[in-house]
Image: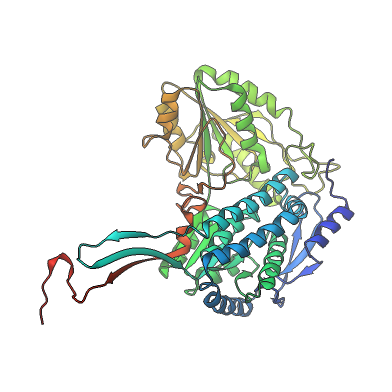
Amino acid sequence: MAQTTDNAAIAETLKALEITSENAGTSTGLQTSNSGKLITSVSPVDGKNIASVTQTTPEEYEQVVQTAAEAFKVWRVMPAPQRGEVVRQFNEELRRLKEPLGKLVSYEMGKSYQEGLGEVQEMIDICDFAVGLSRQLHGLTMHSERPGHRMYEQYHPLGIVGIISAFNFPVAVWSWNTALAWVCGDVCIWKPSEKTPLTGIACQKIAARVFANNNLPEGISCLINGDYTVGELMTKDERVPLVSATGSTRMGKQVAQTVGARLGKSLLELGGNNAIIVTPDSDLKMTVIGAVFGAVGTAGQRCTSTRRLIIHESIYDKVKNAIVDAYGQLRIGNPLDENNHVGPVIDKNAVKNYQNALTKVVEEGGKILVEGGVLEGEGYESGCYVKPAIAEAENHYEIVQHETFAPVLYLMKYSGEVENAIELQNGVRQGLSSAIMTNNLREAERFLSVAGSDCGIANVNIGTSGAEIGGAFGGEKETGGGRESGSDAWKVYMRRQTNTINYTTELPLAQGIKFDL
């Protein structure tokens, strides 16, 4: 049954998540404060005001940090498997509230209801991963060159982790960080995007209940709200050893400089400019599905969205025509209606960026294959619904080199061997996700080799978009180099320590040095 945005359904969703018309934007758990000015969340789905959240003041931030620092002293000494048990309980609450939370994600951000549910599923999956991880925070043992000595390496909790997340995945990215940080023994302070503050309120309320039910102190899960000035309070704060920031490359550079100036650590997940290489040995049906979903899913607002399609000249027209035909079947409209493929972009500023991109590509010599435009009339009152567009372009165009956070796909040709396509794929400043469509083993292996894709994610016969829990998510170059979620990404949330134990009655020195007294 299709979901709609009728007032009663939205009211029921907000009630289930304990969201009121005005919400305290600063929280250390069950304790909240609300002295700051109001931020109103406006849905791109229908242009309606959903609810308001108070912005965190500097005084409130100071109280949050002090509370978090005290909570860390308690949380860090709890055995990691016990911390994992708390995360498991949080996971149970996410499972219970999956439907309303997924609906809120969809309504506040504009992605499809299925994608909203999928994002909450990512939260559930990373919690499952973290629970197992809580029993596997392994160090290692080494052999000493000194007789009667033992060496080993261990990981300790780091402290306060600051998390700055983006609007496009308003809950998943937070959970990737918190679930791992919590089992690692860290406490977290989260600043969600000011464009999607209500999903942050909902998640914080869920976490607060779980920590309180376990008789744990305030401050393990904290929430602050506001614009970049509130984020700067964390990036400049020496009491926050790690800041994890997701967003634009421009924002990431500012975070890196500020945190780096105090020799703190930053985990950066920034822009993508992702390409799919389509070789003569590709499967056309798979290519179309992967490319179209990659380009228009979340209205082109994923960091892993497909921006460029690099097609061999021998099959260029065939692939182009198939993609254009597929675009003709797309249904644009209310994302809570499961019959629609594409919802709105986040706001009218995003609409302007989309329009500017289409103007710019033509000015640089590109050709529009599928016309863009802003939709008007019944169902499009928010002014945030745009038509997914396709343009023929060259890789060196300035607009192609730039990440446009909107459903604009650039098609380009390559000739000769796959190496030429790889050169185009790598010929941008970003390095997040990449893919190749081929049934040729040599081409696939070349793409995955040291001389292949320079991205943090390189896929064969699947698209660029989406991240699977278990693998480390992140990219190189101007994407920032950070890794979240799976594999050994947990290590960034901990401090590493090398230990040497002498169990003899003598003190031999390393490298055979003599120091007799």
Where does the image place residue 193, in percent across and percent down from the top left? 64, 60
**Picture layout, residue 237 above or below residue 267:** below
Camera-side residue: 66 or 268?
Answer: 66
**Picture layout, residue 476 above or below residue 342:** below
Where does the image place residue 498, in percent across and percent down from the top left? 33, 66
What residue is shown at x 60% (from left), y 65% (from top)?
A: 190
Q: Quadrant of the N terminus?
A: top right
Q: Quadrant of residue 164?
A: bottom right
What residue is shown at x 54% (from left), y 72% (from top)?
A: 78
What residue is shown at x 60% (from left), y 26% (from top)?
A: 286
Where does the image place residue 254, in percent across and percent down from the top left? 49, 61
Q: Is residue 193 visible?
A: no
**In this rendering, position of residue 153 left or right of residue 257:** left
Q: How many marks?
A: 0
Q: Is residue 206 visible?
A: yes
**Colour scheme of this structure image?**
rainbow
| Residue lying farthest to the bottom in this orientation | 517
Camera-side residue: 447 or 380?
Answer: 447
Q: Quadrant of the C terminus?
A: bottom left
Camera-side residue: 516 or 281?
Answer: 516
What residue is shown at x 30% (from left), y 64% (from top)?
A: 151
Where does the image place residue 129, in percent across and percent down from the top left? 57, 53
